[in-house]
Amino acid sequence: NGIKLFNGEGYKLSDELEEEIEAIVLDGVQTPPCPTGGDVGRVSACKNAVEDYVRHLLSVTDVDLRGMRIAVDCANGSASATARKLFSSLGADCVFLNDQPDGTNINEGCGSTHIEQLSEFVKKLKFFAGVAFDGDADRCLAVDETGALVDGDKIMYLYSCYMKEREKLKNNTVVTTVMSNFGLYKALDQVGIGYAKTAVGDKYVYEHMVQHGDRIGGEQSGHIIFSRYARTGDGILTSLKVMEVMLAKKERLSKLVEPVTIYPQVLINVRVRDKRTAQEDPAVQAAVESVAQALGDNGRILVRESGTEPLVRVMVE
């Protein structure tokens, strides 16, 4: 999809620095000074990366998965190199799907971007649950024992409730983006958990978490950040946290997320010449206000600019 750049402390780059880099790239006139030869730098390969990563996850989770029948969809991506080793260490009775990457089949009809295959598999073979990662495994979606989708919003609800029960939910707050489903907020209101809303993107979620000391945040897409353990989404860590709650509560996944009613959501992208002008148009603002009043407390309308294209995104729930 593109290039992700991290600074020396493991954080995604700030918007300002990204824009500065982009301006240089797109300038086409001014060529920045480029080092050559030995001045370019060094590439070092970490031979024990998989073992180090699995050992890290085992150190931050306390779960014994013996007896749990779980389906794991690796999306023919990076989880193919780590998931089997990890879940085997925890004693889970797992079936691994799409864990044979060939360089071209990543995310191809599988993984968290194509959850249907996992859903049917879990339902048909009566597994306890299923988890699916995307290609780089920073996202995780789950399916319950009936094959129903458990998305990032439901995962945040599930784990924030568990944290609150154990008095681990710092600030009593979950950090979401503006695209989280209205049903999540309704469910959090019912259990007395607060929430913050950031711009779309896990880096904005994490920035807010750092500034306020929050412990859990994420996106509907399955990017969940547990700030005690990571600075970005980690799909495999997320899957372990879901199973941790299932084991601790001795409850089916469908029951644990039952309080979250996902509201129907429609997203329409409108191509415009100028994003800001379109949003500031009085007729557009009047239409948005009219819809907001009509929906009242039972829905919402959100109009926002695309960060990458000449589009205004209109979302209604």
Image (spheres, rainbow, N blue to C red):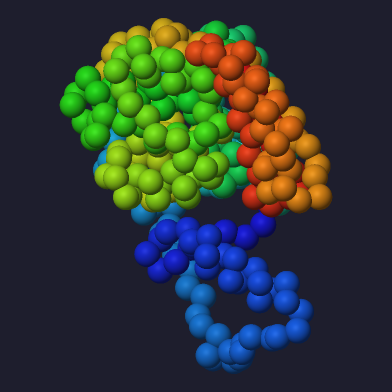
Residue 255 lies, in percent from the top left, at: 41, 7
Above or below: residue 247 compared with residue 89: above
Q: Nearer the viewer, residue 261 or 131?
A: 261
Q: Which of 293 and 149 is in front in this view?
A: 293
Residue 113 lies, in percent from the top left, at: 65, 33
Above or below: residue 62 compared with residue 230: above
| Residue 294 appears anywhere in the view | yes
| Residue 99 appears anywhere in the view | no
In this rendering, position of residue 250 left or right of residue 34: left
Above or below: residue 117 compared with residue 147: below
Task: Residue at 78%, 37% (x, y): give it.
Answer: 270
Q: Which of 202 and 238 is in front in this view?
A: 202
Residue 27 lies, in percent from the top left, at: 73, 77
Q: Which of 92 and 170 is in front in this view?
A: 170
Task: Residue at 70%, 85% (x, y): give it.
Answer: 30
Task: Residue at 52%, 43% (x, y): give it.
Answer: 199
Above or below: residue 202 compared with residue 256: below
Furthest residue toward left: 167
In this rendering, position of residue 69 left or right of residue 278: left
Snapshot quadrant of residue 284? top right
